[in-house]
Image (cartoon, helix red, strand yellow):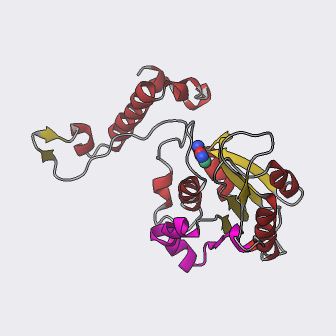
């Protein structure tokens, strides 16, 4: 997978060089670049924003530096790419990013993230880009950040960890929250007794069937308590008779 990030604060993306994502790059599982649209601003002050037409507070990012920054990374892509890249635009006005979308994006060959700032990027840039790429405004949630960089860090981690070979043990992906429509069960490790608190005895039983059942019940109960919306969205076909007895 190739990921290109467009940001006027490239240093914000340095954490992507660390840990599992950094290792995915060194292992050749991920190509990662960061491009600053300010490099394509032609005036003496390298201006990338201006006042909004129609008035209003704040500044809007000018389309031309973004268009040239996008052209520079599309020009560098492997022409053999089977499908058009996805341009993810982090925005509070976007579709809410979910684990399901993370899996969708992890299946793509080429992602470009455009980290807008201020009041956003001139809409004509997104319309123009739509000729070459699939534009996808995405939001981390119903709140507003100062820019897209923090969202890109989160989305990039959520996506790249799903790329085969990035996570050491792919089985650990199978029982995570939001996989299968439920939140994950509580986890425990040594010591068995800690500050007068014991590990649930089922987990010490060695009885795999009982342990699996206990975990499933915990998932259902935790999801019902914390995210009743997810329970309502469950596909009844994924529930078995024992689940309905919870
Ligand atoms: N909610 C978000 O993802 C966001 C991105 C930029 N500002 O807010």
Q: Residue at x 40, y 31 (%)?
A: 222
- Residue 128, placed above or below residue 79: above
- Of 159 and 90, the residue lying toward us: 90
Q: Is residue 38 magenta?
A: yes
Image quadrant containing the C terminus: top left
Image quadrant containing the N terminus: bottom right
Q: Is residue 100 magenta?
A: no
Q: Residue at x 48, y 29 (%)?
A: 227
Q: Residue at x 57, y 42 (%)?
A: 144
Residue 191, horizontal then vertical, whole percent: 16, 52
- Of 112 and 55, the residue lying toward us: 55
- Of 125 and 234, the residue lying toward us: 125
Name, please, the residue furthest toward the left: 196
Report if residue 1 is visible in the image: no
Name, please, the residue furthest toward the right: 131
Relative placement, left or right, of 36 versus 161 is right
Relative placement, left or right, of 128 versus 234 is right
Residue 91, horizontal then vertical, whole percent: 65, 46
Residue 97, horizontal then vertical, whole percent: 62, 44
Q: Which residues are magenta?
A: 10-39
- Of 34 and 181, the residue lying toward us: 34
Report if residue 83 is visible in the image: yes
Task: Quadrant for residue 100, please give it.
Answer: top right
């Amino acid at each position: 997978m190739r990921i290109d990030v467009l940001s006027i604060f490239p240093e914000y993306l340095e954490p992507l060089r660390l840990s599992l994502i950094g290792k995915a790059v060194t292992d050749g599982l991920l190509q990662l670049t960061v491009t600053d649209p300010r490099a394509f601003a032609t005036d003496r002050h390298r201006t990338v924003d201006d006042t909004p037409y129609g008035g209003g507070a704040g500044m809007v990012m000018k389309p031309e530096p973004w268009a040239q920054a996008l052209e520079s990374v599309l020009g560098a892509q492997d022409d053999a790419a089977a499908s058009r890249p996805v341009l993810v635009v982090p925005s509070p006005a976007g579709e809410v990013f979910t684990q399901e979308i993370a899996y969708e994006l992890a299946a793509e060959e080429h992602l470009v993230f455009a980290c807008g700032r201020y009041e956003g990027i001139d809409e004509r840039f997104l319309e123009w880009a739509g000729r070459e790429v699939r534009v996808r405004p995405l939001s981390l949630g119903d709140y507003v950040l100062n820019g897209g960089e923090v969202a890109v860090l989160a989305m990039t981690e959520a996506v790249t960890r799903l790329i085969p070979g990035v996570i050491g043990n792919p089985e650990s992906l199978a029982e995570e929250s939001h996989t299968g429509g439920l939140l994950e069960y509580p986890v425990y490790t040594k010591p068995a007794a800690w500050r007068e608190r014991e590990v649930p005895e089922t987990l010490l039983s060695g009885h795999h069937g009982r342990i699996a059942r206990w975990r499933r019940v915990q998932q259902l109960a935790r999801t019902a308590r914390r995210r009743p919306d997810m329970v309502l969205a469950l596909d009844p076909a994924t529930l078995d008779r024992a689940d309905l007895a919870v």
